[in-house]
Amino acid sequence: MRIQYPPNVHIIRTPCTGRLETEYFMRAIENGADGVLIAGCLEGGCHFIEGNLCAKRRVNYTREMLAEIGLEKERLRMVNVSAAMARPLADIIIDMVETVRKLGPNPLRQSDTSRKLETVS
Amino acid sequence: MDKDNNKKIGAVLVQGGGIAGVQASLDLANSGFKVYLVERDAAIGGMMSHLDKTFPTGDCATCIVSPKLVECARNLNIEILTLSELVGLEGEPGNFKATVKRYPRYVDEEKCTGCSECTQACPVEVPDNFDRNMGKRKAIAKHYAQATPNIFGILKIGHAPCKTTCPANINVQGYVQLIKKKEYIKAVNLIRERNPLSAICGRVCTHPCEAACTRSNADEPVAIRLLKRFASDKEIEMIESGELALPKERTPAPNAKKVAVIGAGPAGLTAASDLAERGFAVTVYEALSAAGGMLRWGIPEYRLPKKILDYEIELIRRKGVTFVFNCRVGKDISIGQLCKDNDAVFIGVGVNEGRPLGVEGENMQGVLQGVEFLRRAGSTDSKPEVKDKVVVIGGGNVAVDVARTALRLGAKSVEMISLEQRHEMPAYKEEVEATLKEGIKIRNGWGPRRILGNGSVTGIELKRCTSVFSYDGRFNPVYAEHDRISLDAEQIITAIGQTSDGRFLEHIGAQTAGRYFKADPVTLQTSLDGVFAGGDTVSGPASVIEAVAAGKRAAESIEQYLNGGNLRSGRFEETIRPVPEELLPSINNIEKKSRQQSCELPVAERACNFHEVEIGLTEEAALAEAQRCLNCALCSECKECIEACEQNAVDHAMRERTVELEVGSVVLTAGFEEFDATRKGEFGWGRYRNVVTSVQFERMLSAAGPFQGHVVRLSDGRETRNIAWIQCVGSRDSSCGNEYCSSVCCMAATKQAMVAADHVDRLDATIFYMDIRAYGKDFDQYYERAKSQKGIHYVKSIPSRIVQMPGTDNLRVRFVDEDRELKEQKFDLVVLSVGMEPSASIVDCAAKIGVELNDYKFCATKRLLPLSTSKPGVFVGGAFQEPKDIPETVTQASAAASMAMEMLASARNTLITKKSYPDEHDVTDEEPQIGVFVCHCGMNIASVVDVERVVEGVRNQPGVITATHTMFTCSDTSLSNIKDMIHEHRLNRVVVASCTPRTHEPLFRETLREAGLNPYLFEMANIRDQCSWVHSSEPDAATDKAVELVKMAIARAHFLSPLEGSTLAVDQKGLVIGGGLAGMTAALTLAEQGFEVHLVECSERLGGHLHNIYRTLEGDDISGFTNDLISRVKNHPKIELHLETEVAGVSGHIGKFTTTLSKNRQTSEVTSGAIIVATGGKEAQTSEFLYGTSDNVITQVELEKRLCEGAYQAKGQNVVMIQCVGSRNKERPYCSRICCSMAIKNALGIKKQDPDANIFVLYMDVRTYGFRELYYKQARQAGVVFIRYSPDAKPVIYDDNGLTVALKSPDFPEPIKIEADTVVLSTGIDADLENNKRISNMLKVPLNEDGFYVEAHTKLRPVDFATEGIYLCGLAHSPKFIDENISQARAAAARAATVLSKTYLDVSAQVSYVDQEKCISCMTCVKVCPYNAPFCNKDGKGQIEAAMCMGCGICASECPARAIQLHHFETDQFMVMIRQLFADGNGEILARAPAKIKGITGKA
């Protein structure tokens, strides 16, 4: 579809969002990601039946942890999109970049290059 | 078994690549057969690929179908033949010869890499049929975004009317498209392929093309001539500015054959130009002093400047043509000499003798010939003298030219006398208008009578002409001789036509016809050998473009003549194929755009000079004008794609061809097409833009569709608020011949309304219906949710018509509401739920191969043989057999595959391919040696990302031995290069930065294997989809990102380990649980293929429910069928029967299950590679409606038994049947599917005994889907009364010395009471809950809320369980009919056969494994795994059964002890990418990398 989105977004591949560990989200932010977006299958439409629901639980848990250590929950977000939803996904990414931009740089980051990491199943 | 086993062919042809064909192909290929999957479209995927979501689960159709398509494309034993159809079948079952017609794709499937450069280059945008003409596509494109195979194709339907009408067949559409693309030079070059006089014709052509332009039917034709002129002028401009150089001068080869051309007019010039192009030495002999003929001497300068003429003649001269001027053949040189000196001669002289008037006074001084006048006016030395008062006789173009020239040469007044009325004048309209503008008078309807004067002209006497043409259009002027006038004139110039020079004709000596040469119409040969003639000298005076055409034609003939070829065959004109009229673009909904006008020199600036009057189009106007072209032929053959394709894959010359295939069997899975809604004109589809079909609406909802999922009105793009669905458009409708029900539309409309409600805030959705046929598994629950949760309105009424309201384009729907009142309601958008019809192409195919169709052109089958066609060895599945939805289609496809498997069992594994690979190079003790390959993907990546900078940016990363870039990394040469590099540099890791791993990873992994490397030592960075495509306007940022992505891939590559999947021995036996229809059918299907089967039945006899059924609705005898089936099972040597046996326990996994059987408290164990669950259901019990209290209240099952055993006396009976007893309510929310048909079957049974018996059927919805609908109609015709009741007002029964049923029907104003002799209850089917619970626990497979088993995926894995190796069929799945049970049982057997046919199963290497030392025995993994792969081993630790693991990694993420890892997606492999992404330097990233490759393998 070639829909444009900002180039400061990097995608890491996973077989299923269910494979994503809490640690990945935390490490990404610790290493300097301004935001982490998890894109999983639609609820009820997971390729592996319910991996996305496991991920949802972990993402929600990690969001609470972020809040506890004084970071904004909005830096971590999970969305559900299907393979035919290129346009909505691009909109989500753009929205996420905007959200993170408003929050300002990740305070844990030393260098000042603005980056964001995203994972897609 | 068959005696000629050895003749059987282990290959199957599957016709139709929709989901049915794909499923059948996969099942066949995976069980040892070669498959040819033949598909009419350019890609497989069928109707399902058009859908947005599927019901009732709401899955994205693309998401679920795409992996299946890709699997199909990757299967070595499935050969996909797209754009193909079966057209013949000879031979016998087991050994057929199939003829397949293959239509051209115009793109080489082997060479195309799917890069899409061609689509980017293609200027032609045409309506996209995939989006049902709501969106646009390029003429060269993929069938749809996720198309499989991932290759492009061109849409061609012939040649556009402009091209076919042009005498020279110039590719008009092509050059118009090139102009649209601002490729002006290419446009001119394309014109010059057929016409060397581009700039000239851009000014003076008679442009018959414009008259033929399709656009003229909508508004005005495209200004083709002006566009040609615009492009040509651009070329001249560029030459003048030095931007473009004139072509180099060429000279013919010394030994070239010689051709003489007589006459340097348009015909001669064209022939000379073309012959020179063809390599001949051409000399042109011209009687006058310069080339051009009538172009120079007949057309005035203000229309065709000499500069333009000279320019194009110069181009021809530069091709190596020699001109000899002032050389008149017959005077200065003889034809004999020419013939002697040359190998061939072309005569292209003009006709330039003016035709005399034939009236008195014609020879007086002051009377001039028009052509002579123009010739002198065009010369520099002998300009004619012009008097003040000039009269020009004639109404054609020459007369106009003469008049305007006379004016410019100083005449004070010029008047034209034309026989014709203004609208009849042969001169062009625009020329006439220009003439009038310049102040010239035109006197229409008069002809010359005599010229007045004495010696010198003083005037002319005219007579009135009353008509010019006879009734048949011939020139035949009639005069009113006495109606005369006289005009004063000092000079009279006649321009009433030309004729040829008789002396020249005589000199040549060739045969003539009248005043012209006689030449063969095809070859232009004259009666003299080697002498050809064309143009005016053969045809009489004609247009420039006709002369050009003659020149081209002659050149082609002369080449053949000189090369000794056949002059009549292989001619250019044979390549011209007009677009069939019905395929021309529809002009109904074109947005009107007015034609661009040329600028003109103001009249004041024209007088007394010969400056060019027409200035031409501005660039802006030309671009706008080119946009108006409708692309009638789809592909314009502008050939931009050829240039864009780096792989040279495009081939416009491809032709249709046929191939012959040897196959043992054929499976027809041709699917359906949607009903053509124009056949129901009252709904206005095609006329009202806001009326769409259900397929269009699916595309509208799809995020990948033309509106990105926005629900908008086509008329104004406004978001809709209220939408109506009209059901049964083209179904259940005898007025259009489709009396059947299309089975899926009720649910599809419900789903569309549900999805639309998610897209549109506060959507108001109304569905107009006849009966809601929510008969499938979980459908009724979905329907109830639509009503209660989404507020979708259901109105039981089919509207009579739709009217579009002017101004708003809103739609007024007229219908009779439930209170029987005529109503009208306004909607933004109306969706027509169009029914299913077989496609014309499959109907045709069936006729050719001898397969019978039913009355509605679906494949004719019998209920008890639902998969067999009338032709032995040819099987059918899916919607072509009967309208059905996806699960039933997929089921039937597998079942049809089982029919072929059974027939060809002895030829299994005889034609399949298995690839072998070199031994894997052991990399255990090596440091990582990484090779990086960065792909340009033509321009796909390289036009945005600086590929070379990426290579330089990663070259020094740790471990990188070599980094390079390639044009197409996936091309054959590049892949062999990768293999060479692996050997040369002893690479043990490969990183490719290119496109998506989704399509290309398997290919690269394959390359590694071929080079002796483990395929898991490969990593990919997607710098196309994630860089160049999505950051196309930021090349620097895209390049930076690409460098980072490749660095991340390299970092990860350090952590990759070789993995080896294990293999698993298969116990090639089946186990079937349940001995009813489904169980017996499944067991027999496996046994007939040669597999041993254990059939376990808990009761003492086989047959289950079949014993309660006597006949089908269609009248088939079930008792006989049952007995036959039982005896076949009992006597089958491969079936071991276990009656009165329970399953007591199951262990193991796919390939090897061990099942404990218990019989009379004694247990035994059997093993099998697969298990089929067919445990059945039960007739639902009831105590409602006095059942059990009154003897006259019985169930349908009891009634059927009594009827068939003759125990029921129908005579004079009043029978009331009550439907949905105990179902479709809170307790049992599902529909039992079969009861409506069963009631109709019994009602017809009673009517057969006594046509006067009164039968009342009380129903909620009559759900006789598919062809069962015909029996519903039959019952109504037989007088059975159907009365609807609503679920909240059920009928009431009381027994007061006889039964009375009372109800309040929404369709009747008054309450109804019916006295009944018999009340018959439709109680439906229940799940066998207790038994199902027990077995589901043992097999660890789930049950739904109603107690039926849950399949792996409702739509695409309807007979699989999520647990591999266990399959499901029959009533245990959900209620269904006998034919559906047979299909499902066979499908389950086919699925099981994909396992049992193998001796070993490959187990994926990408599975999870447990580090036994770290495991804390919490068994979290056992709890979270959706596939039951982890188990507690004998040490009390978690362990994962690789054969059952699907590789999702949920367990790895959940394991609290971090004891579990998923191979190839290990924690370290993720973490290193994250660290790399945020690293400033390189060093410490890999600090934690294993120094050497760990020797871990995925061996289970």
Image (tube, rainbow, N blue to C red):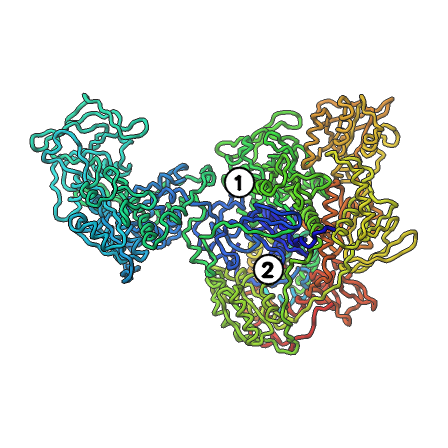
Q: Which residue is mark 1?
A: B713
Q: Which residue is mark 2?
A: B998
Q: Amino acid at mark 1?
A: Arg
**Which chain's residue wears label 2?**
B
> From where the camera sits, is residue B316 visible?
yes
Judge the density around disc 1: few (<14), some (14-19), many (≥20) Cα neighbours within 10 Å. Answer: many
Q: Residue B211's mark?
A: none
- Residue sitting at x 66%, y 71%: B1058
Left or right of B1136 in this view: B816: left
Residue B1126 lies, in percent from the top left, at 82, 44
Residue B381 lies, in percent from the top left, at 12, 48
Relative to the observer, which residue lies in front, B270 or A40?
B270
Residue B1140 lies, in percent from the top left, at 88, 48
Q: Amino acid at mark 2?
A: Arg
Disc with the residue nearer the chain's start (2 vs 1): 1
> From where the camera sits, is residue B1033 visible?
no
Q: Which of the 4 image quarters holds residue B1315?
A: top right
User: Extreme right residue here?
Assistant: B1161
Q: CA distance from mark 2 to mark 1?
A: 35 Å
**Which chain's residue wears label 1?**
B
SS for dot 1: loop
SS for dot 2: helix
Left or right of B636 in this view: B1052: right
Q: Is residue B918 above or below residue B903?
A: below
Residue B1434 lies, in percent from the top left, at 83, 67
Query: In what quadrant of the picture does the C terminus of chain B appear?
Result: bottom right
Q: Is residue B981 above or below residue B52?
A: below
Q: Report the mark closest to the observer, 2 or 1.
A: 2
- Residue sitting at x 75%, y 61%: B1066
Q: Is residue B23 above or below residue B361?
A: below
